[in-house]
Image: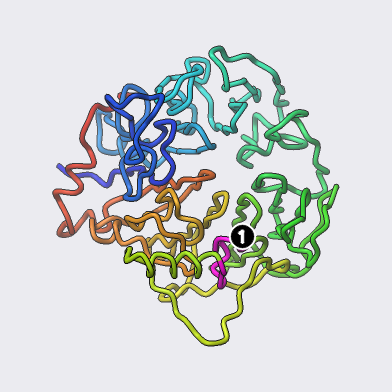
Amino acid sequence: MYYNQMTWFGFGFNGFGQIVPFGKVDCETPSENHVKIAVPAVVKCSNDSSVRIVSETKHEKEAKAWNMQVIACWSRTASFFGKGEGQVHLTGFTDGSLDRRKSISRSTGCVDAWITERYLTLRFTDRVECWTCDGANMELVLKLEQDSSDRKTGHSAPLPLVPEGYIASEPPLFRPLSPQLRADRLALGTAHALLLCAGGTIYTWGSGSHGQLGHGTLVAEEEPRVVEALWGLPVCAVAAGGWHSACVSEGGDLYMWGWNESGQLGLPSRRCREESEQKKETGQPKREQEETGDDVFISIQAFPALLDIPHVSEVSSVSCGSRHTAAVSCQGDLYTWGWGDYGQLGHGNLCSSDQPSLVDFFPKHGLCVKDVKCGPWNTFVSATQANPAGPHADDDAATSYSGGLTITT
């Protein structure tokens, strides 16, 4: 019997085997075919098993599958089940070696996880722990107790937010935040941060060298500063890339700002045009780009700008990589744009684009996209069958995606 099972896919940079295992390829010198994954592939976790669930009943299976999460940094991914079920599984550069899969026994019972190049942060019901994860041995470097009031309320704000502050990617790991901000979500870029408050207001701070703070300047901010251009607009989601930022309003509108060098803002990019022309001259396939005689290219957009995605009335979620962006529509379609040299746009090629384009892999296989999480150079997507109650758009696809071993809980 077929169930509405959530499946995670990944595409883009696979230089450490964090999406697809190298197999018999020499890990010291993996081939380009293994490093660049341009077509969505099922995400693998420990023991080379696909990210899916087998349990005794249909209801248990569906509930746990929908609770699966995948997060990524540059060299590894972490997959885990929320609500304290199971363990965190690391894939990629682990224990000082490439192409490794490892279950973190000390993560048993955690309800949330966050990973950076150097640290793995685990949230439990009564504490938060930060462990090093960039060497052969993991070491505990920070432990925060969660007081009784937080244990009762569950402290719903996800990592990297913690009570009274947040966990940074570099020491000092704990950074305080004023309780008056009423922090709800936090997105960390390479050197800047976006904070979404409970009332839907956005604050930013950190480096502003590429306009990524949204204040209309290129200067840094040491303390959280409200993005005045979005004042009064209720926001429900934020994302931070390497040097660009994005947010989604409660009405489903997408706003973007910061660096547009690779078209990651969905605005005309000189780099994308030059790349398109080069491919045209060499006879290679190219992304279609509209050309006019008086093109204007935008390098930096220092104020939030509304981005209109063709055929999309509302956006439900957005995520930013180093120089690419991915958004999910309320209809369950995935759109990507920006830097694509490693296939992180998911269009089956290594082209960049300054125009949001549908990733047709998912509708072709009868899949509805639920969420997207960008790593710096790759993209991870959760999807389920578009119409599980009716005729299957592609039964063969649904069957093939459940191949391999399973995680038994």
Task: Point out the residue furthest to the bottom here.
Answer: 293
Task: Point out the residue furthest to the right here.
Answer: 222
- Residue found 32% across the figure and 66% down from its top: 283
Q: Which residue is mark 1?
A: 246
- Residue found 65% across the figure and 15% down from its top: 140
Q: Is the stretch drawn in magenta largely helix, strand or loop?
A: loop
Q: How many marks?
A: 1
Q: Position of residue 137 (x, y in %)?
A: 56, 12
Q: Would you say 213 lies left or right of 395 here?
A: right
Query: In this view of the protein, which residue sits in the foreground, 280 or 212?
Result: 280
Inspect the magenta stretch and tell me whether residue 268 lies in it. Answer: yes
Quick one: SS at disc 1?
strand
Q: Amino acid at mark 1?
A: Ala
The quadrant the C terminus occupies is top left
- Residue found 48% across the figure and 31% down from its top: 76
The quadrant the N terminus occupies is top left
Q: Position of residue 146 (x, y in %)?
A: 70, 26
- Residue found 81% across the figure and 51% down from its top: 224
Query: In this view of the protein, which residue sits in the foreground, 37 or 305?
Result: 37
Query: Residue 175 lies in what quarter of the image?
Result: top right
Q: Position of residue 28 (x, y in %)?
A: 41, 24
Q: Position of residue 155 (x, y in %)?
A: 65, 37
Q: Which residues are drawn in magenta?
A: 260-270
Query: In this view of the protein, which residue sits in the foreground, 15 or 266?
Result: 15
Task: Point out the residue furthest to the front here.
Answer: 282
